[in-house]
Image (tube, rainbow, N blue to C red):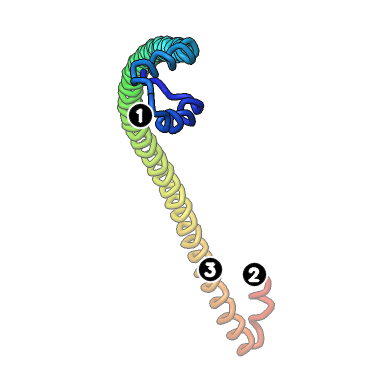
Amino acid sequence: MAKTESPRTIAAAPLSADVPHAEPPESLDKVRDILFGGQMRAVEGRLQALEERLLHEQAQMRADLGKQISRLEAEARRELQALTEQVTADRAKSSEELTALGADLRDGLRSLEKRHVRLEEMGGAADAELRDSILEQSRAVSAQIERLSQRVSADLNREVSGLRHDKADVSALVGIFSDMAGRLGESIGNGTAAPRDSTRS
């Protein structure tokens, strides 16, 4: 490390130049070393100790920083490993849930297909039963209509027969009344037949 000159020596330098018998430079160095050598060596020692201390602290800081970085890297690796395991577990769980959901959907579709087939069968059976019921009811209605038609026909025939009989009776009555009217006319014309006709009637 370079030595620094004291202000006394700098101020004294021009005076020594004016002296006719100046000491050689070696003697000045000796005088300077005698006067300030101890202080310079102490300063140099302190500076060297300070430099060593700074280097030691720098090395310590580097070591501490390295340790912290190592701890951070280890913690980051642990966190990454934990996240990876969690993602893997979640993915496996999601895959299992999707598989179970797919199985449930397939079972539901099969159940719906079976129900649809059963409903179609029930609908076909219900249609057949409805057709049979309608056919049976139509047959019953046809038979009832036939019986009612026969009854009405019989009633009509009886009424017609009664009307014919009544017509014959009316015709007979008309003939009787006509005969009676003729006879009454004859008796009125003769003037003597009225009591006889009245006794007959």
Residue 5 appears in which quarter of the rendering? top left
Indicate the quadrant where residue 131 lies. Answer: top left
Residue at which label 2 appears: 201
Q: How many other residues sit within 10 Å of disc 2, few (<14), some (14-19) or many (≥20)?
A: few
Q: Residue at x 30, y 22 (%)?
A: 106
Q: Residue at x 32, y 18 (%)?
A: 95
The front one of 91 and 43 is 43
Quadrant for the N terminus, please. Answer: top left
Q: Amino acid at mark 2?
A: Ser
Give the residue number, with chain letter if any, for mark 1: 119
Residue drawn at x 39%, y 20% is: 3
Specify which label sits upstream in the sequence, 3 or 1: 1
Report how far apart the C-alphas of labels 3 and 1 lie in the structure: 72 Å
Q: Secondary structure at mark 1?
A: helix
Residue at the spot x=38%, y=24% of the render?
22
- Point out the residue furthest to the bottom here: 189
Q: Is residue 68 visible?
A: no
SS for callout 2: loop
The residue at which mark 3 appears reads as 170
Residue type indicated by callout 1:
Leu
* 5 in relation to 173, above or below: above
- Image position, residue 6 (x, y; %): 48, 24
- 44 above or below 178? above
